[in-house]
Amino acid sequence: LLGWGERGVAVRLIAVPLFYGHAMLMRFRLARAATVAEILAVAAADGWLPPGADRPRTPLEVVGESVVSIGELEPDGQGGYWAWIVSGDLVARSVREAIELAESAREL
């Protein structure tokens, strides 16, 4: 692709109307290498639900709740990570929590 020896582009497209709750597809890179398990441990310490078969993966599954759930977390193959995060419509502090999680992850 584009003459690069390795893949240099990661693209994901999400086109969904959200009437309830919140959803975010976020790509991030940490200051140092960390495993997915380490990142999930930091998120769990802040009260976020880790991915799992019984965990919410869509905003509709968390309507009326005050929960933040990581539906998916995976390496992007270039030293960063992709995270699919959903939260209920009662999470008024979700932006602040995302910032706090990023600050906590800096310690990794």
Image (cartoon, rainbow, N blue to C red):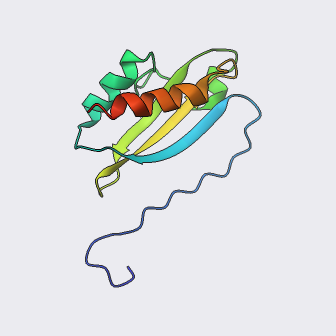
Work out whether residue 56 can be spotted.
Answer: no
How many numbered tags mark residues here?
Answer: 0
Indicate the quadrant where residue 50 lies: top left
Indicate the quadrant where residue 91 lies: top right
Work out whether residue 78 can be spotted.
Answer: yes
Question: Residue shown at 70%/22% (left/top)?
Answer: 89
Q: Position of residue 19 (x, y in %)?
A: 77, 34
In the image, residue 64 above or below residue 106: above
Q: Quadrant of the N terminus?
A: bottom left
- Name the residue furthest bottom: 3
Question: Residue shown at 63%/30% (left/top)?
Answer: 59
Question: Residue shown at 50%/32% (left/top)?
Answer: 99
Q: Position of residue 105 (x, y in %)?
A: 34, 32
Q: Position of residue 68 (x, y in %)?
A: 53, 23
Q: Position of residue 93 (x, y in %)?
A: 62, 22
Q: Quadrant of the C terminus?
A: top left
Question: Residue shown at 74%/43% (left/top)?
Answer: 17
In the image, residue 81 above or below residue 101: below
Indicate the quadrant where residue 40 lies: top left
- Residue 24 or 92: which is nearer the viewer? 92
